[in-house]
Image (cartoon, grey):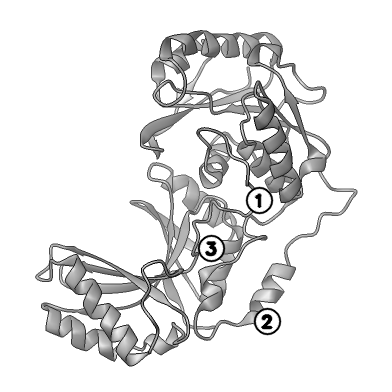
Amino acid sequence: MSTEFDIFLAGQPGLEPLLAQEARDHGFADPQPTAGGVTTRGPWSEVWRANLTLRGAGRVLVRIGSFRAFHLAQLDKRARKFDWAAFLRPDIPVRVEATCRNSKIYHDRAARQRVERAITETLGAPIQPEAAIRVLVRIEDDLVTLSLDTSGEPLHRRGHKEAVGKAPMRETLAALFLRECGYDGQEPVLDPMCGSGTFLLEAAEIAAGLHPGRSREFAFEHFAGFDTAAWGAMTQSAPEIAPETAPQIRFYGSDRDDGAIRGASANAKRAGVADWCQFSRAPVGEVQRPDGPPGLVIVNPPYGARIGNRKLLFSLYGSFGQIMRERFAGWRVGLITSDGGLAKACDLPFTSGPPVSFGGLKVKLYKTGAL
């Protein structure tokens, strides 16, 4: 457990600084944003904790070794000398993925095959294309780096959201957008186009102190030497919600679609936050300000590029902006869209964040201060 590894928290390009901030807030060692994620270091317990607690990370990769190789025979020889048994079990299938850049070894498939053969012939683990355990081989400038994907299923799959809408927001992305809006779990959140309820579920879980990975399994549970007792202690140390400190209803979702509301309600129940969420069927024009203190309105409306006709969307965005100005004084607004013209149609004092890849589009978060 004392051996430290280089850990890579894979994240959404464009939001790496927010993920680094989250990792810093959770006490991870010197998290540094880099292209496509955040680097940190730590023992296996920190790898586990990153999977369990970080909301913005898409995967957690751990570097298990590196060596130089200038040709395939050398790669074959050194891959066979590597101590695979320290990390992988002979009875668990694995798959190998290889990438080569600026190296004398330039054929990804040939490199992959050499490492696959080394694993099967020295360890005995079977190779399966769909195996849950992934060995990642990167050859760059003739340096071979070996890593393991410790997450398995992507981390946005929390295990609670079965019902999804037409263009669902990933949980990891929603969590980072909430962070970018300054949400800290202490205020109400309203989503007037809530779809499957992702923003509200993430916000409610943050307020309740629930770990995002509490309901799912991870790839590292099938690694060699995995300490079941230590992992059990870590998961059981998750904060319990005392009734007197549990959040009251302060997460409000509405949508014009009955199916979306039923799905969001079911998702909230599976996540254990249904008592603090209120979902209702209503078009944007009928959204009312909830009683109580101001908070955050956050919305992922149709963009036109994917759902709906762009010309018709101008009136939707305009109506949304008007309702915010008229009914939500003191509240902050966050809006995600790929279309700056539609954001402008809201006539709200937006500032925009960096472009973020989402579903083949580049979207931005447009946010306001208190209206």
Residue pictured at 82% horizontal, 41% vertical? 275
Residue 227 badge: none
Residue pictured at 43% horizontal, 51% vertical? 11
Residue type at mark 3 is Phe
Q: Quadrant of the N terminus?
A: bottom right
Which percent across, then down, holds residue 295? 70, 28
Q: Is residue 273 visible?
A: yes
Q: Nearer the viewer, mark 1 or mark 2?
A: 1
Q: Is residue 280 above or below residue 162?
A: above
Which percent across, then down, holds residue 137? 29, 70
| Mark 3 or 2, nearer chain start | 3
Q: Residue furthest right?
A: 244
Q: Nearer the viewer, mark 3 or mark 2?
A: 2
Residue type at mark 1 is His
Instruction: Identify the residue position indicated by label 3 in the image.
Output: 28
Q: Is residue 186 above or below residue 209?
A: above
Q: Is residue 343 above or below residue 11?
A: above
Q: In terms of depth relative to the viewer, which is nearer, 340 or 130? A: 130
Residue pictured at 42% horizontal, 14% vertical? 310
Instruction: Identify the residue position indicated by label 2 in the image.
Output: 229
Q: Quadrant of residue 184?
A: top right
Residue pictured at 9% horizontal, 70% vertical? 104
Which percent across, then down, holds residue 248? 84, 38
Report the Cα–Cα distance between label 1 and label 3: 26 Å
Q: Mark 1–mark 3 contact, CB under 8 Å? A: no
In terms of secondary structure, where does tag 3 sit? loop
Q: Is residue 140 visible?
A: no
In terms of secondary structure, where does tag 2 sit? helix
Instruction: Identify the residue position indicated by label 1 in the image.
Output: 160
Report the Cα–Cα distance between label 1 and label 2: 25 Å
Q: Nearer the viewer, mark 1 or mark 3?
A: 1
